[in-house]
Image: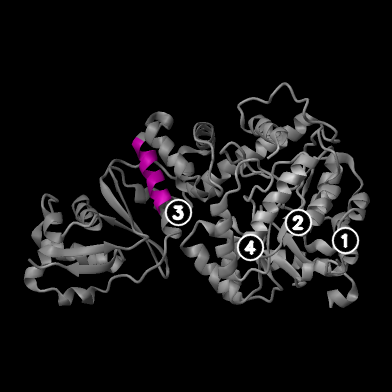
C-alpha cells in the first residue's frame, strides 16, 4: 500500500504558535496568517475566556492542535478523559490534526510537565504503538507524533530515534511532526549526524515541521524557544521540506516572546529556504 | 505493558523530581552530553516550569514576598504537593492548599493566604463560563410580600473572598506595577466576576459581603438578612450594587 504524501492532510503554509500575549493583536489587527497552532492543554480545562478567544480565532484561521501531556510513552494507564477532551476540543475548533510528543511526561500518578526521553527498545515500541492506536481510534484520524529534544540517552536503547519513529509510523499509520530544531539540538547533545536522521525519516508520514530558536551553551544545547532560528536549522528545514515533498511549517516562540509581527516575520523567513513555488 | 520500561520511567521520574541526584546512573549513557549535565537540565526544567506557573498565577503574592521567598515557597509546594494533573492549569491551587496547612510558611501569615485566595479566584473566574448577568428590571416583578422569599442565583464566575486584610489594595498595587506592601488590617469582602468586557473586582463592607455570600449559598433574602448586621435601609442599595456588578445571573421568588 502506498502512503499518500502527508497522509492526505493539507499543506497549510507557514504558521505561528498561538500565545496569550498575541491574543489582542490577532483579534484587533486580524493579520494574514496561514494557520495557528494551539497548545491543546491550555484550552482543555477551561470553560471560559481562553475557549471564547479560540472560538473567535478558529472562525478566521485554520487551527492545528499540539499537546504536551498525552504522555504517549508512559506505562501508566492512558488518560482516557484527556483523550476525550482532545477529541472534544478538536471538534470544537475544527483542528486539521492533533499532535503530541514522543516522550512520557509522568508515571506512577505523577506529572513532571516535561517531555522525558524514552528508551528506544522493541518493548517500548510495542507499548507505544498500542497506545497510539487507541488514541487514533478515539480521534478517528492519525495522531501526529513529534520528535523531542533530548539531553539524556538510555543505555538500553536498541535503535536510533529515527528508526523508532519510522517503525511507529509503519505499525500505526501515525503522522510525524518533524521538529528540525529538535533534530539539531538532539544531534549536538547526543552526537549523531542530522543527515543520518533525515535519511531515516519516513517522509510520506511527515505532516508538519517545527522550527524554533535554542540556547547554545557550547558543550550542550537547550531547546528554549526564546531566540530566532539559527541558519543551520533553516538549512535543515529546507532539506527536510524538499525530501517530504512539502508540508506545513510552524515557528514556536515560548519565552521572551516578541510582538506578533516580529514572530510572524521570523516564521516567514522559512520562505528563503523553501522552493520558489512554495515561497510564492 | 513493558515491565522494564515501567521501572526505567519510575527511576527517571525520581532522578528528576527527587531532592538529590541519584548516585547510581548506570541506566544512562551514550550521549555526548555528560549524564550529570543532562539530568541537571531536566531537574532544572521541572522546577523552573512549576515555579513559573505559580508565579503566573500569583504575581501579587510574589511581589509581597519578594522573589527569593516566593521561590522558596514554590519549592516547598512542589516538594509537598507535586503535580499529578495532566495539565498545569490546576497546579496553582496547590499553593493555596499548602498555605492553608502551613500558615507560618511566609512571614505574612494570613495576609499571604488571603492575597493568594484572591489571585486564585481571579484564575478561576477567567476559566468560568460567561452567562448574562441578572437585569435589575427583574426585581420589578417581585411583589412587596415576596421579597423575604427571593433567592438569587450566583454567576458561575463569581468568587467572594472574606479577609481581615485589604487584599484588593495589595492587588491594585500590583496592577499599577508598584511593589506590593503589607497594609494595616481592615476587614473587607472582595467579589471577582467575569463580564463580557473583562474581569471585574469590587470591594464590599463585611456586612454587605455577608449578605451576598449567604444569598449565593441559596438562602432566601429574609433568612440571609438575619444576623448579618446590615441596616434595613441599606439592603436595597447592596442588592442593586451586587446585581449591577454582575454577582447574580437569575432570581426566583417563592411566596408563602
Tell which circle, 4 or 2, labels the residue nearer the N-terminal end: 4
Tell me, yes or no, whether dots 4 and 2 are on the same chain: yes
In the image, is residue A88 above or below residue A129? below
Q: Nearer the viewer, residue A161 or A76?
A: A76
Which of labels 3 and 4 is toward the front?
4
* Residue at image location 45% in from the left, 54% down from the top: B123
Start-end of magenta stretch: B110-121
Residue A139: mark: 4
x, y percent for residue B15:
67, 30
Judging from the image, mark 4 belongs to the subunit labelled A
Asked whether A228 falls inside the magenta stretch, the response is no
Q: Which residue is mark 1?
A: A240
Pair 1/3: label in front? 1
**Mark 3 = which residue?**
B123
Secondary structure beneath dot 2 equals: helix
User: What is the chain identity of the residue bearing mark 3?
Assistant: B
* Residue denoted by label 2: A172
The Cα–Cα distance between marks 1 and 4, rounded to whole angstroms, is: 27 Å
Q: Secondary structure at mark 3?
A: helix
Seen at 31% across and 66% down, the residue is B246
Among all residues in the image, which is located at the extreme top?
B23
Amino acid at each position: 500500500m502506498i502512503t499518500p504524501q502527508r497522509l492526505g492532510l493539507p499543506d497549510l503554509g507557514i504558521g505561528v504558535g498561538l500565545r496569550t500575549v498575541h491574543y489582542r493583536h490577532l483579534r484587533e489587527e486580524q493579520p494574514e496568517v496561514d494557520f495557528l497552532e494551539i497548545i491543546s492543554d491550555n484550552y482543555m480545562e477551561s470553560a471560559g475566556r481562553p475557549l471564547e478567544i479560540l472560538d473567535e480565532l478558529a472562525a478566521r484561521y485554520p487551527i492545528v492542535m499540539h499537546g504536551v501531556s498525552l504522555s504517549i510513552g508512559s506505562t501508566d494507564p492512558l488518560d482516557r478523559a484527556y483523550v476525550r477532551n482532545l477529541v472534544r476540543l478538536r471538534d470544537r475548533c475544527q483542528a486539521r490534526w492533533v499532535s503530541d510528543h514522543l516522550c512520557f511526561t509522568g508515571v506512577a500518578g505523577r506529572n513532571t510537565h516535561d517531555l522525558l526521553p524514552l528508551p528506544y527498545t522493541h518493548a517500548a515500541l510495542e507499548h507505544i504503538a498500542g497506545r497510539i492506536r487507541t488514541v487514533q481510534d478515539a480521534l478517528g484520524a492519525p495522531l501526529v507524533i513529534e520528535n523531542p529534544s533530548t539531553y539524556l540517552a538510555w543505555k538500553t536503547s536498541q535503535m536510533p530515534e529515527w528508526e523508532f519513529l519510522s517503525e511507529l509510523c509503519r505499525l500505526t499509520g501515525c503522522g510525524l511532526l518533524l521538529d528540525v530544531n529538535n533534530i539539531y539540538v538532539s544531534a549536538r547533545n547526543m552526537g549523531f549526524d542530522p543527515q543520518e536522521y533525515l535519511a531515516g525519516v519516513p517522509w510520506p508520514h511527515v505532516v508538519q515541521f517545527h522550527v524554533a530558536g535554542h540556547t547554545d551553551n557550547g558543550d550542550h544545547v537547550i531547546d528554549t524557544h526564546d531566540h530566532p532560528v539559527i541558519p543551520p536549522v533553516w538549512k535543515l528545514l529546507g532539506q527536510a521540506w524538499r525530501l517530504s515533498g512539502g508540508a506545513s511549517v510552524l515557528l514556536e516562540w515560548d519565552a521572551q516572546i516578541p510582538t506578533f509581527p516580529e514572530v510572524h516575520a521570523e516564521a516567514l523567513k522559512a520562505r528563503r529556504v523553501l522552493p520558489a513555488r512554495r515561497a510564492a | 505493558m513493558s515491565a522494564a520500561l515501567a521501572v526505567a520511567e519510575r527511576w527517571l521520574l525520581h532522578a528528576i523530581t527527587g531532592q538529590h541526584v541519584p548516585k547510581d546512573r548506570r541506566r544512562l549513557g551514550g550521549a555526548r552530553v555528560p549524564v550529570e549535565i543532562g539530568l541537571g537540565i531536566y531537574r532544572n526544567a521541572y522546577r523552573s516550569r512549576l515555579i513559573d506557573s505559580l508565579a503566573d498565577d500569583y504575581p501579587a503574592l510574589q511581589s509581597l514576598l519578594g522573589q527569593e521567598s516566593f521561590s522558596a515557597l514554590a519549592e516547598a509546594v512542589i516538594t509537598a504537593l507535586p503535580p499529578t494533573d495532566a495539565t498545569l492549569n490546576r497546579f496553582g491551587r496547590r499553593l493555596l492548599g499548602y498555605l492553608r496547612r502551613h500558615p507560618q510558611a511566609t512571614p505574612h501569615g494570613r495576609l499571604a493566604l488571603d492575597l493568594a485566595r484572591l489571585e486564585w479566584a481571579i484564575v478561576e473566574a477567567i476559566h468560568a463560563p460567561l452567562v448574562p448577568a441578572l437585569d435589575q428590571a427583574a426585581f420589578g416583578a417581585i411583589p412587596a410580600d415576596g421579597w423575604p422569599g427571593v433567592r438569587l442565583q450566583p454567576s458561575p464566575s463569581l468568587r467572594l473572598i472574606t479577609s481581615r486584610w485589604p487584599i484588593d489594595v495589595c492587588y491594585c498595587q500590583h496592577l499599577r506595577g508598584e511593589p506590593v506592601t503589607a497594609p494595616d488590617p481592615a476587614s473587607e469582602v472582595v467579589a471577582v466576576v467575569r463580564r463580557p468586557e473583562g474581569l471585574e473586582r469590587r470591594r464590599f463592607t463585611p456586612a454587605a459581603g455577608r449578605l451576598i455570600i449567604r444569598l449565593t449559598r441559596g438562602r432566601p433574602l429574609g433568612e440571609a438578612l438575619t444576623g448579618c448586621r446590615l441596616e434595613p435601609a441599606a439592603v436595597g442599595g447592596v442588592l442593586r450594587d451586587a446585581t449591577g456588578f454582575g454577582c447574580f445571573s437569575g432570581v426566583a421568588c417563592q411566596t408563602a
